[in-house]
Image: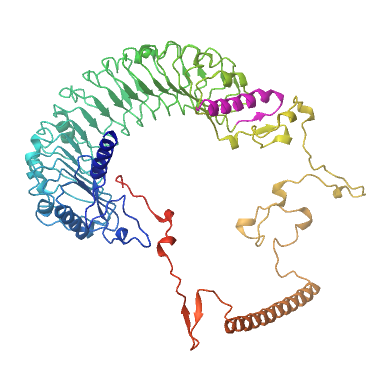
């Protein structure tokens, strides 16, 4: 009984996830080229995929059109199934025509409609959504539409609407219609919206998320409408045009905001009043602005803030008082700024919460105080890549017991103390020191990092002497233990983890060197064979052979009067010669070239004659074989001399190739 129950459950799962709609393939079943399996050959590029709710999602891909979509919807209806979502992606939009009630006839229970990344212009959508009482989400993105389809205003239960990356320049209140009472998510980013009528956005009483940046213009009327959406929780104004500052009263009615993005705007300063009312704010994105100054009290009221990004600005220093009240902050991104130093206790206000700190690409950052990271007991990820740091001492990371990932790549690091990661022996999993100036590295340091799974030491100037032996052995032990205890360990870019000195090991991976060949490095003995300069003993001092200067042998073809070649340096002996005279050829050279030409022609003629003789011989041989039936055994001659196939069958199915299948899953 136990096994029967298992089989019954398995059959149910298969039935739910493996529904077969006659006349409409699923993307999992579809095979572009499949010999001998006619089921997978189709001209319909709209596919029927079962979803988790035991209904059908129709996905139309490149090459499909409205006829394909109609056939798929009809196939689902004929199979007594229900279409819940329709996704049309990467198509020629002009191939789709949507007459009135197009969807309500074959997909009356449609919940979500998506059309994205179109070529050409979408056909008439004015009445396409009429009669769809259960439709909750519409996404028409990057499809060149210039207005909101009128039929959308008649949908009574619409919750999500995205019309991003289109050509909409104006939105009126009537275009939302019944949706003003139900809409929770609106994305119109990437359009050409500027002016906004009163009530267009402020009347969307349930709207929680608004994305309206990227090419839209932050006019006074638009910003006023946004400021009156009282239930708004997430506002994205990324890359909106014309926004250089925020009015002091802008957030007066937006006290429920939890996520806020001004990325890619043109802010220069952040003062103490900008965000003072946003006590519920959790995520603040100020990336890629022009910010140079931030008031020390700018974030004082943001006690619930968990994510703060100031990346890509012009900050030169961080005042420790700036982060003093951010007791909930988990992620702080200060990358791509102009920081020169990190002072003691800069992040002290976040000591019990901060988990990720990014200081990457601060090229001028050369000084990080030993106490800069003091008491960051929760910090798990630290990124100081592409900074001017030259060393890591044993104090810098001493108070980071939870650190799991450290990225110090592309810096100027020449030395790392053997006990630099002593406090992370059981926590550090990823260590990236790629692209530094390291010549040696303690094998004991690697060996002590018990949890290490990813190590990158590539693109350094490794000195492969007897001192590198301990590092090589430590890495070998890591690999052996990983295999023995079924753990992960990987030396990334091992082929680029190569020796720089001594010369005999130059560009050889440190893991490929025989330890027996490693010895103490003596710089005075590490030489390469250099071409010596030679001097001929003659009475003329000009005959002395010297090392050459590239500029002395660099010249261009052309007349010496040419403006492009007038300043070219030439050898003294050639000063009176034209730079490149193709007519200055001696007669005896011409005669030699003439003889060479005739010799070449003769060789070619001989080769052609030889090939013709060989072809004639082969043809005669083939004809002789045919007469004696020395041909493929699957071909025979009839009595009348005609060729016929033998009775042996040719199994087409055996010629199928598994690698010709294309696994196209639901996420297409």
Residue 442 can be seen in this image: no
From the viewer's perspective, is residue 635 above or below residue 12?
Answer: below
x, y percent for residue 207: 15, 32
Q: What scheme was used to colour the molecule?
A: rainbow
x, y percent for residue 610: 70, 79
Quarter of the image for residue 654 reads: bottom left
Please tell me which residue lies in front, 432 or 61: 61
Asked whether, in this view, residue 494 is left or right of residue 661, the answer is: right
Magenta span main SS? helix
Please tell me which residue lies in front, 336 or 36: 36
From the viewer's perspective, is residue 375 above or below residue 132?
Answer: above
From the viewer's perspective, is residue 131 above or below residue 346?
Answer: below
Q: How many marks?
A: 0
Please tell me which residue lies in front, 435 or 226: 435
Residue 485 in magenta? yes
x, y percent for residue 473: 64, 25
For the N terminus, the quadrant is top left
Quarter of the image for residue 22 reads: bottom left
Tell which residue pokes out farthest to the front in this image. Answer: 1
Q: Which residues are magenta?
A: 460-486
x, y percent for residue 515: 71, 29
Asked whether, in this view, residue 251 is left or right of residue 271, the answer is: left
Residue 560 in magenta? no
Asked whether, in this view, residue 427 is left or right of residue 662, the answer is: right
Quarter of the image for residue 500 reads: top right
Asked whether, in this view, residue 167 is left or right of residue 328, the answer is: left
Residue appearing at x 60%, y 25% in the figure: 477
Residue 2 can be seen in this image: yes
């Amino acid at each position: 009984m136990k096994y029967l129950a298992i089989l019954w459950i398995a059959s149910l799962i298969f039935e739910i996830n493996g529904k077969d709609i006659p006349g409409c393939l699923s993307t999992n079943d579809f095979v572009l080229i499949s010999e001998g399996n006619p089921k997978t050959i189709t001209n319909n590029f709209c596919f029927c995929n079962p979803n988790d709710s035991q209904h059908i999602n129709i996905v139309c891909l490149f090459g499909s059109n409205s006829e394909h979509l109609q056939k798929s919807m009809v196939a689902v209806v004929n199979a007594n199934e229900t279409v819940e979502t329709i996704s049309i992606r990467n198509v020629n939009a002009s191939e789709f025509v949507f007459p009135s009630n197009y969807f309500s006839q074959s997909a009356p229970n449609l919940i979500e409609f998506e059309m994205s990344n179109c070529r050409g212009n979408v056909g008439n959508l004015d009445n396409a959504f009429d009669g769809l009482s259960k439709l909750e989400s519409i996404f028409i993105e990057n499809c060149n539409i210039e207005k909101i389809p009128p039929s959308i205003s008649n949908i009574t239960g619409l919750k999500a609407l995205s019309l991003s990356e289109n050509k909409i320049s104006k939105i009126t209140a009537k275009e939302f219609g019944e949706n003003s009472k139900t809409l929770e998510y609106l994305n119109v980013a990437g359009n050409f919206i500027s002016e906004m009528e009163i009530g267009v956005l402020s009347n969307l009483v349930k709207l929680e998320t608004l994305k309206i940046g990227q090419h839209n213009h932050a006019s006074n009327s638009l910003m006023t409408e946004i400021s009156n959406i009282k239930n708004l929780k997430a506002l994205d104004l990324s890359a909106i045009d014309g926004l250089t500052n925020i009015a002091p009263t802008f957030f007066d009615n937006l006290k429920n905001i939890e996520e806020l993005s001004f990325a890619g705007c043109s802010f220069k300063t952040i003062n103490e009043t900008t965000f003072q009312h946003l006590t519920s704010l959790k995520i603040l994105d100020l990336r890629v602005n022009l910010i140079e100054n931030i008031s020390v009290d700018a974030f004082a009221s943001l006690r619930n803030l968990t994510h703060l990004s100031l990346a890509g600005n012009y900050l030169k220093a961080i005042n420790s008082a700036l982060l003093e009240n951010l007791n909930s902050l988990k992620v702080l991104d200060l990358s791509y700024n102009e920081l020169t130093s990190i002072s003691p206790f800069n992040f002290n206000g976040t000591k019990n919460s901060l988990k990720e700190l990014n200081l990457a690409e601060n090229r001028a950052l050369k000084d990080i105080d030993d106490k800069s990271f003091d008491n960051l007991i929760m910090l798990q990820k630290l990124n100081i890549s592409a900074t001017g740091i030259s060393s890591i001492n044993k104090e810098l990371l001493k108070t980071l017991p939870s650190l799991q990932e450290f990225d110090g790549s592309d810096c100027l690091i020449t030395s790392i103390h053997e006990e630099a990661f002593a406090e992370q022996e059981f926590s550090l999993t990823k260590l990236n020191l790629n692209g530094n100036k390291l010549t040696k590295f303690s094998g004991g340091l690697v060996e002590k990092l018990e949890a290490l799974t990813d190590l990158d030491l590539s693109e350094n100037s490794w000195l492969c002497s007897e001192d590198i032996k301990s590092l090589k052995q430590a890495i070998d032990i890591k690999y052996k233990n990983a295999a023995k205890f079924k753990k992960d360990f990987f030396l990334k870019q091992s082929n680029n983890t190569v020796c720089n000195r001594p010369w005999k090991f130059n560009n050889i991976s440190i893991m490929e060197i025989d330890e027996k060949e490693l010895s103490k490095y003596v710089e005075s003995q590490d030489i390469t064979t250099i071409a010596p300069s030679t001097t001929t003993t003659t009475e003329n001092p000009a005959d002395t052979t010297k090392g050459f200067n590239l500029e002395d042998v660099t010249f261009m073809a052309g007349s010496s009067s040419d403006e492009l070649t007038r300043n070219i340096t030439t050898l003294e002996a050639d000063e009176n010669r034209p730079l490149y005279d193709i007519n200055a050829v001696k007669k005896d050279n011409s005669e030699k070239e003439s003889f060479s030409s005739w010799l070449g022609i003769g060789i070619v003629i001989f080769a052609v004659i030889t090939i013709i003789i060989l072809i004639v011989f082969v043809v005669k041989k083939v004809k002789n074989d045919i007469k004696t039936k020395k041909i493929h055994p699957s071909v025979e001659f009839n009595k009348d001399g005609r060729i016929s196939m033998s009775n042996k069958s040719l199994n087409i199915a055996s010629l199928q190739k598994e690698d010709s299948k294309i696994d196209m899953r639901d996420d297409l």
